[in-house]
Amino acid sequence: MREPEIMRFPPSDWVPNHPRLPVLVYRQGLSTAERDAAAEFERRFAEAGWQGLWRNGVFSYQHYHIGAHEVLGIARGSARLLIGGPDGAVLEVGAGDCLILPAGTGHRNLGSSDGFLVVGGYPPGQTADIQTKAASTTDLQTIANLPLPATDPLHGADGPLPRLWKGA
């Protein structure tokens, strides 16, 4: 198991990003040899206790979530994702990559290949909401105080997320 890339983002225009927690990026978190990467992401996320699993893409407009941290497993294809709001970073992602976005983190699809497929999910008890405007003071408090997941969605209880986020 390789350590994920760690990316931190300050507030960007109207996107709050998270005040403490970094984005985690697992490059080739799943082997591209997986026959059904979407099913394998779903299996791993579910075994780690993450819920609300879905298959789709990433919206083409900038948004963030107040009530949930989010995992994005790239099951098929590739994309250019803007992470961290309008002044964030453009990430080239491809099949097998996995991103974990703390609540408040802006994300947007700037363009993707045909057949681009993402498997997403959320920690237990958290539900995604789609925000496209500045966060209120209450929203910022919710983002900052949202419980940390007990497990890494890709690697379970022994994965890097609990250690990296607890120390943040």
Image (spheres, rainbow, N blue to C red):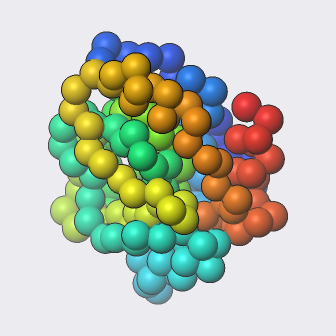
Q: Is residue 116 above or below residue 6?
A: below
Image quadrant occupied by the C terminus: top right
Residue closest to the far front = 138
Q: Is residue 69 above or below residue 159?
A: above
Q: Is residue 14 above or below residue 158?
A: above
Left or right of 96, for residue 162: right
Count of labels shown? 0
Q: Position of residue 108 (x, y in %)?
A: 28, 39
Residue closest to the far top = 13
Q: Position of residue 82 (x, y in %)?
A: 34, 33
Q: Which quadrant of the figure has residue 44?
A: bottom right
Q: Residue at x 50, y 17 (%)?
A: 10
Left or right of 22, for residue 114: left
Q: Position of residue 73 (x, y in %)?
A: 46, 62
Image quadrant occupied by the N terminus: bottom right
137, 121: nearer the viewer: 137
Q: Residue at x 62, y 79 (%)?
A: 47
Q: Residue at x 50, y 28 (%)?
A: 141
Q: Position of residue 137 (x, y in %)?
A: 40, 20
Residue 30 visible in the snapshot:
no
